[in-house]
Image: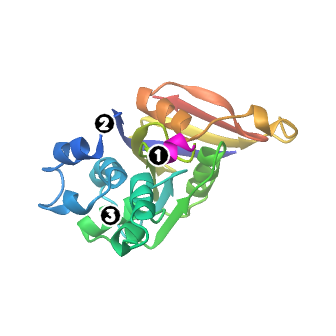
Amino acid sequence: MLERWITALNTEDPGFEEPASTRDRFKDRFPKNATRRMTQLGMLVGSTLEPLAPTENDTLVYASAYAETRAIEGYLDSFPTASPTLFQTSIHPSAVQQTLIVRQQAVRQFFPVTGGAFLPAQALQVAFLADTPRTLLCGGEERGTWLLDNRSASDRAFAFALALSASSEGAIARVTLDDQPGRNTDAATEIRFALPDFFDVLHTRRPFEGLVAPARRFAITWL
């Protein structure tokens, strides 16, 4: 069984807030003119990650199924004169990179993770296996427009960032990830604990215990 302790947690749940409103809300949160170049997801992830003050010695894990949806939409809409700026912004790790660039912060270990129904389990395993004293796990989505109509985007915007430690000192929650061979290995389609489900557990700070991937049980107990 893998065990870690959450020592800090920040969440953002803007609902159906449009990027322009998010930008106006965070205009004083980031350096002057920074928000003009940031995506909505970049601002949401940045607002949750920045208070944790990432350092070069932290392991940073980022989870997102769709990532920079609005930038991808804008890039595709820009054809036949494709926008290189939107292409650069649309890459999967962009939200975290925007935050690190604003802080002029380097990190040695950065693991962007994507996936579907089992994404939280995949990201948690990467975070739990990190060998640094502190691991930062962050993630989120931004709500799409026409990609949402094509079922290729998130239907809601949200973001989270938490700090994981092997020590219980100052902890606000205990989290475990446990292998359970033979449990639901033939019924993977019945298990669904996608990133929005993980976010809701964190945002509402409710206890959870259950299968989050075939033969993989996750539990969180708030202290």
Q: Are marks 3 and 1 in contact (CB under 8 Å)?
A: no
Q: Is residue 200 visible?
A: yes
Q: What amino acid does circle 3 point to?
A: Gln
Q: Identify the residue position indicated by label 2 in the image.
A: 17
Instruction: Give the extent of the magenta segment.
Output: 146-150
Q: Is residue 212 above or below residue 99?
A: above
Q: Measure the C-alpha gap from mark 2 to mark 1.
A: 16 Å
The correct choice, above or below, for 183 with respect to 24 in the image is: above
**Foreground tag (2 vs 1):** 1
The answer to whether residue 212 is above or below residue 222 is below
Tell me the amino acid under the disc marked 1.
Trp
Q: Work out whether residue 189 or residue 217 is closer to the camera in this orientation and state it.
A: 189
Name the side, left or right, on which 103 lies relative to 1: left
Distance Cα–Cα, label 3 vs label 1: 24 Å
Q: Quadrant of residue 68?
A: bottom left
Q: Label 2 near label 3: C-beta < 8 Å?
A: no
Which residue type does callout 2 highlight? Glu
Q: Are marks 2 and 1 in contact (CB under 8 Å)?
A: no
> Residue at image x 45%, y 59%?
72
Check disc 2: other Cα within 10 Å, few if <14, some if 14-19, many if 20+.
Answer: some
Mark found first going from the N terminus, 3 or 2: 2
The secondary structure that most of the magenta stretch takes on is helix
Q: Which mark is residue 146?
A: 1
Please check the rendered image and state whether residue 47 is part of the magenta-colored stretch, yes or no: no
Q: Residue 115: which numbered mark, if any?
A: none
Residue with the mark numbered 3: 98
Q: Earlier in the sequence, mark 3 or mark 1?
A: 3
Residue 174 coordinates in the image, percent (x, y)? 53, 37
- Rounded to the nearest angstrom, the CA distance separating label 3 from label 2 is 20 Å
